[in-house]
Image (cartoon, rainbow, N blue to C red):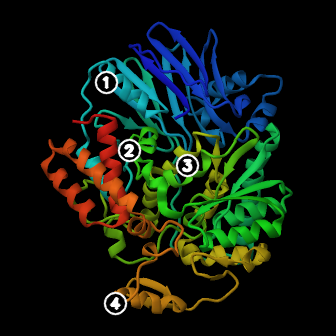
Amino acid sequence: MPGFSCLLHTNFEFRKDACLVSGEIKGLGYQLNRFTLNKFLADKLFSEEERGIIILEGIVLNKAALMKSDSGKGWYDVVWNLYQKLGNDFFRVFRGTFSGLLYDKSKKKWIIFGDHLGTKFLYYYANNDVFFLSSDIKDIYDYLQAKNLVTKLNLNAAYMLLSYGYMLETNTLCDSIKKILPGNYLVLENGEITSYQYYKLPLSTLDQDFDDNEVIDMLDQKFKEAVALQFEKDKEYGYTHFVSLSGGLDSRMVSWVAHELGYKKQVNFTFSQSEYLDETIPKKIAADLHHEWIFKALDNGTFLLDVEEMSLRTGGNILYYGLAHSNSMYRLIDFRCLGIIHTGQVGEAIIGSILKNFSKKSLEKLGGAYSEKLIDRVQTLPVHFKDATELEISLLYQRAFNGANNGYLSEQWYTETLSPFCDVDFFEYCLSIPINARIHHKLYKKWVLEKHPQAAKYVWETTKRKVSQKIIYLRIGEKKIPLHQAHLALLRKLRLSKKPSQTRHNMNPLDYWFLSNRALKDFGDKYVAENLPRLAAFPGLFKDAKELYEKGSATEKTQVLTLLSAVKLYPLC
């Protein structure tokens, strides 16, 4: 994965990638390497001066404002002055997607950091004096293998993968490799490694009085500011706007609002099962807005064969199919003239709340697992939450940042990627609105209808209705089901109708693909047969993985395939 690495008290011969901009800084007891994309280079730093070293990866959306406030200085000087003025967490004033390192030579102090919401993953290995950090987990595995150091499987993490589909907290599949958490940074000084939290999302409230019109006005203003901040970065570099578009609301609102703000030269892109709503809706929107539009059909699910390619990028720490489906399109695109991949990442979870209900049962577990068959094997964080506000924040950090942010690993191989919904200032404003006003998309729909009514005239894939259409819900237990979909839910309950994933009528109909494309089943069966024995040292895990693959859904099969690809590519004993 493009980025940088830092080795202390050791050395290692790095592999070179001709497609990336490389560099090296060496000194007494340290070796720093750069392997970054040839894009947005003016936002990045890889510089050494007498006072210190600064590495900055990614893009800082408010760079121009920061440089203006320290006029006459270069980017290195601006960043160093921020460090002198604000201290170790100087990067808290950055906005964007970034990671980096600062070495203060006079104090012999290393500061290593990621952004507020963890969009740039950093992994590290620390043992005695040796410290190895990298944006690319494969580098650390290569080092451990070259030095004949044991790479032991983190059994708890393996069950996280087979349940949640991603890693919780600092875990990776290797028990000696950790991940820096969102909003955290490391300080290495006097032989000690200390982790600090410099940012945490504020808790929301359950309910309180507020003015609907005032809130929607401010929400719209802050969203426009977040959109403009991203799209201006494309203009700064002369890039064409590359904007995702699906049948949902999130990507639609990014593209639509950007268009209204004057960013009309967009290339929209979509990947989906053909002829489903996730193709037909964005096709109509892009045509009406006079945008260029690229569609990649996911028919037959052939991208599911790319398990090893994806696990090489992720270390197997995330269910691979989500990255594979987007990568199947990105690898066909020439990104030289394209800028940021603008997405609607976790928009519904922010404006609409990631919570589905306020039941007591939901407060007793961390939801969001792809599979609950083995979830009792996972030793998780304390899962009894005081109220819905605590649960919401925990779900955002685990499902959105530790989980969904892994999707960036596919996109960051080609360019930078951002979602205006994840703009820190916009995010905080949304959380200042009580959950009761946001849950079930109540506020989201009001915002679209009042501020961008033309965007509401298209069908919304989630409800299969236009946003402007009133929907009557039926409450069945803890679930709310749209009345017009109740008969389908009943038929599925009685097993008289297939689930959407078992038919073509889904963006990613995994079960349908496994059933209709014999090559996928043959591939999976052969892969399991060849690689399941690698789990022989863990009899319980061997049995559980075998049963989950043989009896599980297509999603559960891909969870098993992800785990097996990781233990094959990175021998974990």
In this view of the protein, can residue 499 be seen by the observer?
Answer: yes
Q: In the image, what residue occupies the spot 47% across and 22% down?
A: 6
Residue type at mark 2: give it: Gly
Residue extending farthest top: 28
Q: Quadrant of the C terminus?
A: top left
Q: Residue beneath label 1, please?
A: 145
Earlier in the chain: of badge 4 and badge 3, it is 3
Residue named by callout 4: 494
- CA–CA distance in space, label 1 to label 3: 28 Å
Q: Tag 3 or tag 1, which sits nearer the N-term?
A: 1
Provide the residue designation for mark 2. 316
* Direction from residue 264 to residue 129 in the image, left or right: left
Q: Within the image, what quadrant is residue 40 found in?
A: top right
Local crowd size for mark 3, using a 10 Å CA cut-off: few (<14), some (14–19), many (≥20): many
Q: CA distance from mark 2 to mark 3?
A: 16 Å
What is the crowding at mark 2: few (fewer than 14 residues within 10 Å), some, or many (at least 20)? many
Q: How much space separates mark 4 and mark 1, taking CA atoms?
A: 53 Å
Disc 4 vs disc 1: Cβ atoms closer than 8 Å? no
